[in-house]
Amino acid sequence: MDTTKTESQPVRGFRNRFQKKPPIYLTILSIFIALVLMSGNVLAQKAEIKGKVVDKTTKQALIGATVAIPSIRAGSVTDKDGNFSFKAPAGKYTLRAKFIGYDDISQEVTLKAGETETVNFELTTSGITTDEIVVIGLSGEVDKNKLGNTIGSVSGKEVARVISSSAIDALSGRVSGVQVTKSSGTPGAGTYITMRGRKTIMGSSEPLYVIDGTIMDNDALYDPSGTKQFGNRAIDINPLDIESMEILKGASAAAIYGSQAANGVVLITTKKGALSPEGKPSRITYSSNVQVDQKYGSVPLQTTYGQRKKVNETTQTPGSSDSWGAKLPAGTKTYKQDEVPFRTGLSQVQSLSISGGVPQFDYLVNGTIEGIQGFVEGSNYDRASVRANLGMSLLPGVTLQINNNYISINNDLPQDGSNTSGILLGALRTPPEFDNSKYLYPDGTQRRFAGYDNPIWTQKMNTFNSKIDRFIHSSDLKWKPFYWLTFAGNFGLDNYSYANVERLAVGAASSPNRNGRIEHQAIATNQMNLDFTGTLSQAFFDNQLQTNLILGSQIIWYDNKSDWVNAVETSPHFDAIEAGATKDGGSAIYKKKTVGLFAQLTSTLWDRISLTLALRRDGKSTFGSSEKFHYYPKAGLSYTLSDEEFMKDIKDILSNVRLRASYGEAGSPTLPGIYATNYLYGTGGFFDPWDRSSVANRNGFIGYRQGGLPADYNVVAGSDVIGPERTVEREIGIDLGFLNNRIGLEATYYYENMFDLILDVPLAASTGFDQQLRNAGQMYNQGLELSLKATPVLTDDFVWNFNFNYSTVTNKVTKLVGADYVALNGGFVGIQNIAKQGYELGIFYGVGFLRDENGKIVYSQWDPDFVNEDGKKGAIYYMDKGKKVYKDQMEMGYVGAPIHDPNLRIIGNPNPEFLFSFRSDFTFLKDFTFSFLIDAAWGFDVWNGTRGALYNFGTHGDTKDREQLWKNELGQQVTIFTGWDSLGNAQFENADKTQKYRTYENGFYINEPHVQDGSFIKLREVSLEYRWHGLQEWNINTVVFTLTGRNLYTYTDYTGFDPEVNTFSLAEGRGFDYFTLPQTMSFRFGISIIY
């Protein structure tokens, strides 16, 4: 049964009637064409628009400002006196004025045939504005003042300023309530984003991405051991292509996207062609950037003690894996093993953009080539991106926008994470006296200190290459037969393919029996969406009541096919699969379809009270047959109190007061999974670890299959009554503006209830299955968001803007059916993230210390009066709930040592208590801009598994005091019970810290000691920009020089490289740091030449 092709009776009936009666279709088409021609005759009657654009403060004319009606692509640029004029068809339009360094401003105009309309604009220097038009996807252009919810915005200029190949990294610290985590500093590594906390247990909490109306696939490959830091596909977009990003943070804002929108929506608008501000037919921009990257942070390593059993260089026999040997002789050469694998990364970006336009046509063509040499060998990222955006007026009132983007990526990923071939794992475990730079013996075999791969050898010999080709297209056709009516159709296409090749060389520790392994994988994904909307705008009662009604539909198709083949016992000289002695392979196909209908009505009374009501009905092929269609309502109310008459006298002080409230419902974009309603049959055990079928991927499908299963393998049954995960959000807020809006404050409180969360629920053995997918969980998020913007100084020669963001989110799981807890994807045997009723989602659950009723650690003690069975006196015990608990020489005979809890327990929380950021921009003499961004996350934990492992192997810097006596946290000397003497007296000896590091804190026994506070404050960005106009006689308008730094300083108590990493990349298991390559500190110099 293929549920992806399931079609409801109404839909099937409509399709059949459509196919049987083509005359009806032709009749409708004929009427459509006739209306177009009729409207063309009406709209062909022209009116003239003229006016002047000046600086609001100085009243000086602004030369080269653009004034246009975007909907019909009519417009002009201002002359030397700031004047403009152009003609346009009669009708009602939004007229927009733009000028570099100033805030855009829009005004509604009604043009009458044969008449002249005069409109003047006073533009304000970029700072704070409360009258902003934003494009919010299917809702179209909306005045922010009319929204009942908050929306975040990031300009293209801010995106381009960020030192990153990923455009979405620009969201870090710029939007309140949005958490951005880069999983690693490896080029091409993924960026994990959540908005207002996590929304699902088994799926993904990342938002939906829409670029120019095309719904992007944001899938990512997943490695359960974190051996590669795969990127999610939202990082493919060229930052230099982006005009703006609008952030719909919750269901109340994004409900119009229905079953796709519970995690929020990122709406990306790319740059378009436009009339040249300089009056030229084209604008040509060439930019070049050079960047250097260095690893950030360090791990303390000891250089005092050597390998316990040395490498035998003669027989090429590796030594012991630990460094618990004797002190190194004086003068022994040691090596900085945390520096050995790294190099200085270098990257270059070259971009050429040509854009321009005339009143009926505009274009933008941009080509960008980016090459990144990563900070470890074998980590490279090359991207070529070509964009062609064309806009045109086909007929009066009919416009077409076509956007095309081709992306080609060649990405080399290094060995990482929990991986015996991992670079950091091999490097940091290396004894201080072992020279890894000599990685080959004379016979060409690998030289290594122990069973792990030499980190230099693995960089050169173990390779992973991913080639990605992607094409993103959107066509947006709009027809405005009358000023009050607009029809729009949008087609979006996102097509991409992977070709992945991994080679583990003969001798690689992570290959089966060190015999080598080669794997080839091909993935092809095709996603399309087709949207239709009709928008009706009318005013009543002398324009006192304005209404806007949108009716629309959306269809989304998703199709994915993957094939893989691998071979082991490979040739040391060939990468071909045929060279392997044993081969295996497989394939998988995934298809799904979503059909949605929606309506939205916005009514504005007296231009200050706005009410928005919306409803979407979605059907999905992944829903059970009895749950095919679901409704997602939305409501929003906005009241601009400051426009009331009684507020006029204090307008200069309290310039803006807007109260808002909203409600919305939305569904999870990833669950239920594609085959949640039935079973996926196959042969041969587990899916390949690269497969998209793990719970971490964006499809959310659990990768079980039948046939050839191990005896202890749990089989999960599908469910034909499974429905979507749902989120209901309520939001209230207030927006304030002071001192003519020089200071602006946004405050928002939200509450989200997530219910019908999909879980594996245990089944009776008689069913033949162990578990079944059901809607069986519930949790909530609530939080506060504050955003303060201000322009403290605003003069002709100096402008200072700053923005402060603060947000909190509190989560609690309130319902889990059939399980005490559910483990999230990503984790280790002794520590994992879980969902547990009554606690926050994702808490660390693992091996910890036993604690008393006051939360204090329990220590072992000696009872001298206890009589053993052989008559000898004395025994080790500990107190538990007021009672003595005895064990036979328990805990390896230590007295005064902490007791490990025999049961797994909560030992930490990776979710921040709050986020905050501070950004400041200084513009002086109009051509110099200095800016910086401070970004922080506070009150969260990270499991420093790297430190725990290095304690075990004796290379961590803390272990250099190993010969000192071990005293517990109470100041008591820890002793070791060694037995009784001939007289029956108990014998003890003092324990030193060697026992502490190798037993209680070795990271493979008790994990709690290595759960650390990960709170940090980062100097995320510093940028200096200078705009030089000295070559205008050569027709070069501006030359822009930029110098930017990123991740320049981190204040934290975390003892690893950086708390801002995650071993399991984009999985929902968060806060793990196990030999993961760190973030980078970067510096970039750039030059842009604008002709």
Image (cartoon, helix red, strand yellow):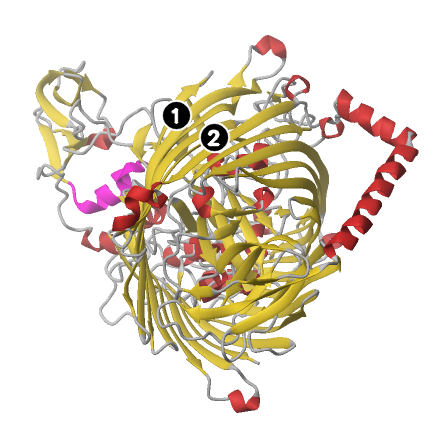
Number of the label disc, if any, that sits on residue 952: none
In the rendered view of the protein, which quadrant contains the N terminus? top right
Residue at point 33%, 74% (across, down): 796
Badge 1 element: strand
Residue 399: x %, y % from top left: 71, 55
Disc sitting over residue 201 in the figure: 2
Q: Nearer the viewer, residue 397 or 264?
A: 397
The local secondary structure at tag 2 comes to loop
Please name the amino acid that badge 2 sits on. Ile
Residue 683, located in which quarter of the rendered image?
top right
The quadrant of the picture occupied by the C terminus is: bottom right
N-terminal-most mark, 2 or 1: 2
- Give, as a three-letter code, the residue at label 1: Val
Q: Is residue 640 left or right of residue 442?
A: left
User: Looking at the image, which is closer to me, 658 or 895?
Assistant: 658
Does the CB distance between marks 2 and 1 fall below 8 Å?
yes
Q: Position of residue 244 (x, y in %)?
A: 51, 57
Q: Which residues are magenta?
A: 991-1010
Please give left or right for residue 749 compared with residue 274 in the image: left
Q: Residues within 10 Å of mark 2 (few under 14, many from 20)?
A: many
Q: Kindly identify the residue that appears in the image at 56 percent across and 23 percent down.
A: 712
Residue 752: which quarter of the image? Answer: top left
431 versus 681 height, above or below: below
Answer above or below: position of 304 versus 513: below
Residue for badge 1: 813
Q: Quadrant of residue 17?
A: top right
Crowd class of label 1 (few under 14; some 14 to 19; many from 20; radius 10 Å): many
